[in-house]
Image: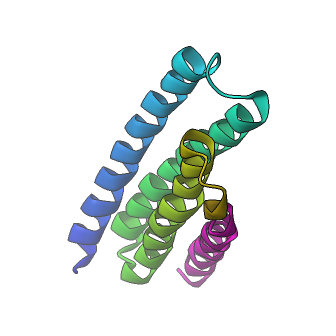
């Protein structure tokens, strides 16, 4: 994928993820506070918070790719996306569906987030 296409996709996915994060946060604040136990609501809130952080990371990465003409920086964005799916997705599953074993997936998503930030930082140093 060329630099411009990578940039556009990362920004688009980041914006969609941010929009979904706002919707999930509102859903949690208005619909779930009386339905979930406080500890599960905290798990859900963690998922929405990290989704928002990494939505911004996706948009930032897309802009870095565009401005720096650095296709290698796009790897950070794809790591953020995979991390969001695994980290946040597993926490949503644990809190909403009660599927406790999904908690074992959460650290994998967390590692992907960390590696994504390291890749983005490394690409920034190189550029």
List the single residue furthest toward the right. 39
**Looking at the image, is 9 positioned above or below residue 12?**
below
Q: Position of residue 61 (x, y in %)?
A: 46, 63
The magenta stretch spans residue 93: no
**Looking at the image, is 78 positioned above or below residue 84?**
below
Q: Quadrant of residue 113?
A: bottom right
**Looking at the image, is 87 positioned above or below residue 43?**
below
The number of discs equals: 0
The magenta stretch spans residue 106: yes
**Looking at the image, is 109 positioned above or below residue 28?**
below
Q: Residue at coordinates 31% horizontally, 64% vertically from top-left?
A: 7
Q: Residue at coordinates 21% horizontally, 69% vertically from top-left?
A: 5
Query: In the visual, does 65 lie left or right of 12?
Result: right
Q: Residue at coordinates 34% horizontally, 61% vertically from top-left?
A: 10
Q: Quadrant of residue 45?
A: top right
Q: Position of residue 93 (x, y in %)?
A: 54, 50
Q: Position of residue 73 (x, y in %)?
A: 46, 76
Query: In the visual, does 23 lie left or right of 118?
Result: left
Q: How is the image coloured?
A: rainbow
Quadrant the N terminus occupies: bottom left
Q: In front: 52, or 70?
A: 52
Q: In front: 75, or 85?
A: 85
Give the main secondary structure, helix, strand or loop, of the magenta stretch: helix
Q: Position of residue 39 (x, y in %)?
A: 78, 36
Q: In front: 19, or 108?
A: 108
Q: Quadrant of residue 64?
A: bottom left
Q: Which residues are magenta?
A: 103-127
């Amino acid at each position: 994928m060329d630099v411009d296409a990578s940039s556009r996709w990362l920004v688009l996915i980041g914006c969609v993820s941010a929009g979904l994060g706002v919707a999930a946060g509102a859903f949690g604040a208005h619909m779930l506070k009386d339905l979930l136990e406080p500890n599960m609501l905290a798990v859900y809130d963690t998922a929405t918070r990290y989704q928002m952080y990494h939505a911004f990371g996706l948009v930032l990465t897309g802009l870095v790719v565009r401005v720096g003409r650095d296709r290698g920086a796009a790897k950070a964005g794809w790591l953020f996306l995979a991390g969001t799916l695994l980290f946040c997705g597993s926490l949503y599953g644990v809190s909403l569906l009660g599927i406790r074993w999904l908690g074992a997936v959460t650290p994998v998503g967390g590692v992907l987030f960390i590696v994504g930030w390291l890749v983005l930082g490394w690409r920034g140093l190189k550029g």
